[in-house]
Image (tube, rainbow, N blue to C red):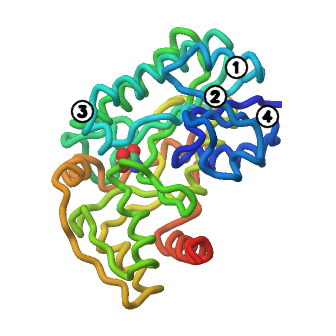
Amino acid sequence: MKNILVIGATGQIGSELTLALRDAYGSANVVAGGHKRKPSSEKLQDSGPYEIADCLAPKVLAALIEKYKIDTIYHLAALLSATSEKNPKLAWEVNIQGLINVLDLAKSYQCAVFFPSSIGVFGDSTPKDNTPQDTIQRPSTIYGITKLTGELLCDYYYHKYNLDVRGVRYPGLISYETLPGGGTTDYAVEIFYEALAHKEYTCFLKEDTYLDMMYMPDALKAAMQLMETESNRLIHRNGYNVSAMSFSPREIFGEIRKWIPEFKISYEIDPIRQSIADSWPNSMDDNVARQEWGWQPEYDLPKMTKDMIEKLKLKLK
Ligand code: AKB
């Protein structure tokens, strides 16, 4: 039986991954670790143990690992791309020092680790379409630099200490449960809320900006499936490209209009987030993940849009 600690459990991925892990491994065996005294959602609070867990406070983390006999850590705490650009030093501190703290503890207590990387690890010199698994990685954002360094650190701890650390490169994530905070791909979530609430949305990226995106159920499946794969099947282990759909603001607008015909869009470009998006791939090739551990997404743009609208209608009632 696994004993799991989720660090960053109140964030965009964590608030849903914690519940999915509790369903799979039992509520008592999955500790939600957040940086606030209380979790923001009642579901998280009521469904299992909740503890304060700051990746920059390794002694507190060590005490939790001992208290709950943790053997697996999902380390999700990180600053996203736009927030990182506003405060590069804090991004380095949280995204790198936080990760090193977790890797060192995992080494001491022999825990497996999941580390989410991002499409942010690519840069202007990377091939934009069907971006290969192994290719040029020269990110121009501090977020990308921290995520790429994170991938390399994870590889290093595996090769040097035989630490079982695994991870994927997530695209923009779309969910009806928790809002993202400070990302470049956030428009793809905001657009649904605004379409339903106000029937209009002002997008901060240009209409023809293509980016990889994924619906949250697929993102949760990717993390859990990778962590369940027999170790000897994994060649890359870290930084697997995983993709599900690639679209532009114009295309997602068109898809939402099929459900809300009066919906309107306008554009007011944020130069910082536009330049971040322009440096990222249009679409990734995820064949290596498909071959090594059977990755297969379930949701494309039409299926995700239908589900988002149905779920958000109920939520916003
Ligand atoms: C962001 O936009 O910063 C994130 C990401 C793609 O890593 N959603």
Which amino acid, mark 1? Ile
Q: Is residue 143 above or below residue 281?
A: above
Looking at the image, which residue is at 49% across and 31% down? 238
Q: Is residue 270 above or below residue 170?
A: below
Q: In this view, does 76 lie to the left or right of 182?
A: right
- Evaluate if marks 3 and 1 touch, with contact meaning CB atoms under 8 Å apart: no
Q: Is residue 146 above or below residue 315?
A: above
Residues under labels 2 and 3: Cα distance?
A: 28 Å
Looking at the image, which residue is at 53% across and 76% down? 309
Q: In which quarter of the image is residue 189?
A: bottom left
Determine crowd level at label 3: few under 14, some 14-19, many 20+ residues with C-alpha closer than 10 A.
Answer: some
Where in the figure is residue 299, as x and y percent of width and height? 55, 65
Residues under labels 1 and 2: Cα distance?
A: 9 Å
Q: Which quadrant of the rendered structure holds the C terminus?
A: bottom right
Which one is in front in this view, the residue at disc 1 or the one at disc 2? 1
Q: In this view, does 239 lie to the left or right of 70?
A: left
Q: In which quarter of the image is residue 258?
A: bottom left
Which label number is shown at residue 73?
2
Looking at the image, which residue is at 19% across and 49% down? 272
Which amino acid, mark 4? Asn
Query: Which of 234 and 74 lies nearest the eye of the viewer?
Result: 74
Which label number is shown at residue 29?
4
* Mark earlier in primary sequence (3, 1): 1
Q: In this view, does 93 lie above or below 27?
A: above
* Mark earlier in primary sequence (2, 3): 2
Could you say whether the residue bearing mark 2 is in a helix, strand or loop? strand
Which label number is shown at residue 65?
1
Which amino acid, mark 3? Arg
Kindly tell me whether residue 313 is visible in this rendering.
yes
Give the number of callouts.
Answer: 4
- Evaluate if marks 3 and 4 touch, with contact meaning CB atoms under 8 Å apart: no
**Tag 3 residue:** 138
